Amino acid sequence: MRLSFIKLESVLLLVVGFAGLLFIMYRDEDRDEPPTVNKKEHKPVIPSDLTVAPTVIKKLVWLPQCQENKTVESIEGFLKLPAHIQDFLRYRHCRSFPQILNSPKKCGGAAASKDIFLLLAIKSSPGNYERRAIIRQTWGEETSYGGAPVRIIFVSGTSKNGHEDKHLRQLLKIESETYGDILQWDFLDTFFNLTLKQFLFHMWLDEYCPGANFIFNGDDDVFVNTFNVVTYLRSIEADRHLFVGQLIANVGPIRESGSKYYVPVQVTTSNTYPMYCGGGGILMSRYTAHAIYNKSQDIQLFPIDDVYLGMCLAKAGLVPASHMGMSTVGVHVPSAKLDSFNPCYYRELLMVHRFIPYQMLVMWKAIQDPHLDCGQKLSIYLGIK
């Protein structure tokens, strides 16, 4: 009888224990998360400084949403083209790039930009620090010429060399913080990308400085007589067409592959270019600058930047004009015995291409010398024009 009681007691304890175990397991299942592939993805995010880190990183490494156009490889003769032309064709459609450095208040804001009489927009490669430094000291100084405010902006891309690019970005950042005159986008600063640089500048101009009355668009190795430029522009209305420089007409693409300006039929089948002005230095009005930007939206990028501007003008029904005071091929003197660097040949000009930095400084001081006597030499120079 006692044995039966013990067995019954054992069975009851076993049943109670098993029931308790089931109860505990049931409660644990209630606390567990729903089954997932990765439970870490469902952990609650606690607000902190760390929660914004992914956004900041994404912004720093953001790349343009522009993919290589591989369909161009099917163009006849594509694989025989020089590498830089192949690259141009592959990325010709790309127009949007991250901006590394900006100067949004260069003209005082869009509304106040109408007070800027002349904006000097200078295309400059990242490594050309000495040129930019001399220009700031001389003809590109931001000042007022007889009540006409002049401002300057340098437009740049990035270097091909990775290590060099890192240091040059630091250089341009320092210049930007010091002078506030740098525009830099994240594209390679190459000859065939000068058109891209031109397009992005006009985009910037339309947003940040749309009211600037006149724009001088040029290279960083030109000499500009800013006094004469301002004097010339005073008699012109900013809201009328103006596009002057050294006029180039009746020319077409150079088909010799060894030329810097080589443009094969794979880029354009046309054998003629519209009239255009040499890209070393061009003066344009506010009206014309906006017309160029508007028409550029519908025109494919072209590897020669000054020709591209001519295409935009033609699309707008406008024509470029020549100005004898603007030369992109230097000054030609009547005799080899004469010094072509004599300031008397430059005092009456608007722009000359090309100068090295020390020459800019020397010439800028020389043309302002009140004792400079150019009577006879000037007449000789003008006599050959």
Image (cartoon, helix red, strand yellow):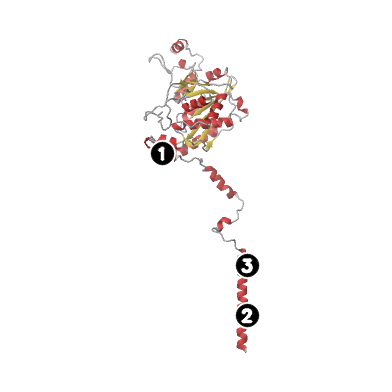
Q: Position of residue 100 (x, y in %)?
A: 52, 37
**Front label number (3 vs 1):** 1
254 relative to 366, above or below? below
- Left or right of residue 329, residue 136 in this image: right
Alpha carbon separation for disc pair 3 and 1: 67 Å
313 relative to 168, above or below? above
Q: Image quarter for residue 261?
A: top left
Secondary structure under tag 2 reads helix
Query: Would you say residue 52 is visible in this rendering?
Result: yes
**Residue at 54 percent of width and 58 percent of height:** 38
The C terminus - image quarter: top left
The local crowd at label 3, few if under 14, some if 14 to 19, many if 20 or more residues have their Cα within 10 Å, is few
Which circle's residue, 1 or 2, is located before the other in the chain? 2
Asked if marks 3 and 1 touch (Cβ < 8 Å), the reply is no
78 relative to 112, above or below? below
**Front label number (1 vs 2):** 1
Q: Amino acid at mark 1?
A: Ser
Alpha carbon separation for disc pair 3 and 2: 23 Å
- Left or right of residue 14, residue 309 in this image: left
Q: Which residue is mark 3?
A: 27
Alpha carbon separation for disc pair 1 and 2: 85 Å
Q: Which residue is mark 2?
A: 12
Which residue appears farthest toward the bottom when viewing the image? 1
